[in-house]
Amino acid sequence: MLLKRKIVERISLEGPISISKYMEICLWDPDEGYYSKKQIIGKDGDFVTSPELSQTFGELIGIWSLSQHLKKFTDKKLSLLELGPGKGTLVSDALRAINKIIKNKIETEVYLLEKSTALKSIQQKKLLGFNIKWLNDVHKIPQKPLVIIANEFFDSLPINQYVKVEGGWQERKIAVKNNNFYFTLDKKVVKFKTNYFDNTPLGSIIEYSFISVEIISLICENVKKFGSIALIIDYGDTFGFGDTLQAIKSHTPEFILNNPGKSDLSSHVNFSILAKVALERGLFVSPVLEQYKFLKNLGIENRLKQLIKLNPGKNIYSEINGIKKLIDPENMGTLFKVLAIFDGKLADLEGFC
């Protein structure tokens, strides 16, 4: 395993590395990183995303995006930005739904933030014929009014973990012994400027993603300057306590220090931190809503009934089961949360009321 050897050599030279650095190497190493693999999403990959479960998901997000555009912007061009678009399924379904409504009366343009050349190649094939532009750097977000979609994006960004000790916090790091990785604590005890975690019991683990804060800050700058609106959908909660870091390979959880570069690494999103960044910049945030409530508010149940009615005798079980999984409170319905960030110039926000 070339990637493991690279990480072992780095730790041997520099000492234990942060979890965020380990994740960054495992996911984005140009030669052996996870996102250089061609098949990671879908039944034959390691995990399935919401758009892959049901085309209705992307269609509803598309209609939601069009509605926000018509409410907020006088420009006839709908500019959509998706962060981490996977196989391009969400935006493909979204554009199909949008085009059915506008019938070419409104021009659409889409920006996709994608660093993986393997995934970009898949997206290019799927999105032939659409007005698509690719970005590989979040700092190159277009300076214009946008509808920004981040579905299952923030969960994949590297995190650091800290353990509560007497007098502060010690960072959890990764070391190596006998060619095997293991967790260790940094000797240095640090204190946080915020009092957000003050009442955390000794021994507790918290997670913090510096790159997530950087990216949400850039999004907020665009929202504040241009009146854009951002929709974030991901699995997580409104707090950041506990070890949520996980590795998935072939749809099965495994120990995160095994098989570097061969499994998907992710963690639960701390929605309260994302909201806090927006509020500190004078922006408005929606309630953090469970996914099943958001999708039901957008009419997914009616679409399911219509789908069944219009397809008697046809094999649409996978689509039906996909929709049910998305809104099942015992499944993705409550695990996934939804948050919108905007500038306050909306009387109401579909899906949240």
Image (cartoon, helix red, strand yellow):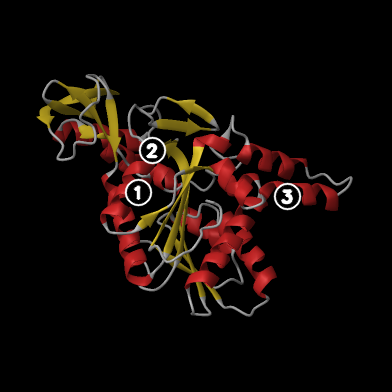
Q: Earlier in the sequence, mark 3 or mark 1?
A: 1
**In the current view of this chain or complex, which residue is farthest to the right?**
313
Label 3, secondary structure: give it. helix
Would you place residue 35 above or below residue 11 in this image?
below
Q: Nearer the viewer, residue 98 or 251?
A: 98
In the displayed structure image, the side of residue 175 where residue 95 appears, left or right: right
What is the spatial separation of the Cα atoms under label 1 and label 2, in whole angstroms?
9 Å
Contact (Cβ within 8 Å) of mark 1 with mark 2: yes
Contact (Cβ within 8 Å) of mark 2 with mark 3: no
The residue tagged 3 is 302
Residue drawn 30% across the image and 39% down it: 159
The residue tagged 1 is 275
| Label 2, residues with CA under 10 Å away: few <14, some 14-19, many ≥20 | some
Q: Nearer the viewer, residue 176 or 275?
A: 275
| Label 1, residues with CA under 10 Å away: few <14, some 14-19, many ≥20 | many
Contact (Cβ within 8 Å) of mark 3 with mark 1: no
In the displayed structure image, the side of residue 105 where residue 164 appears, left or right: left
Q: Amino acid at mark 3?
A: Asn
Residue drawn 72% across the image and 45% down it: 319
Q: Earlier in the sequence, mark 1 or mark 2?
A: 2
Q: Position of residue 153 (x, y in %)?
A: 43, 48
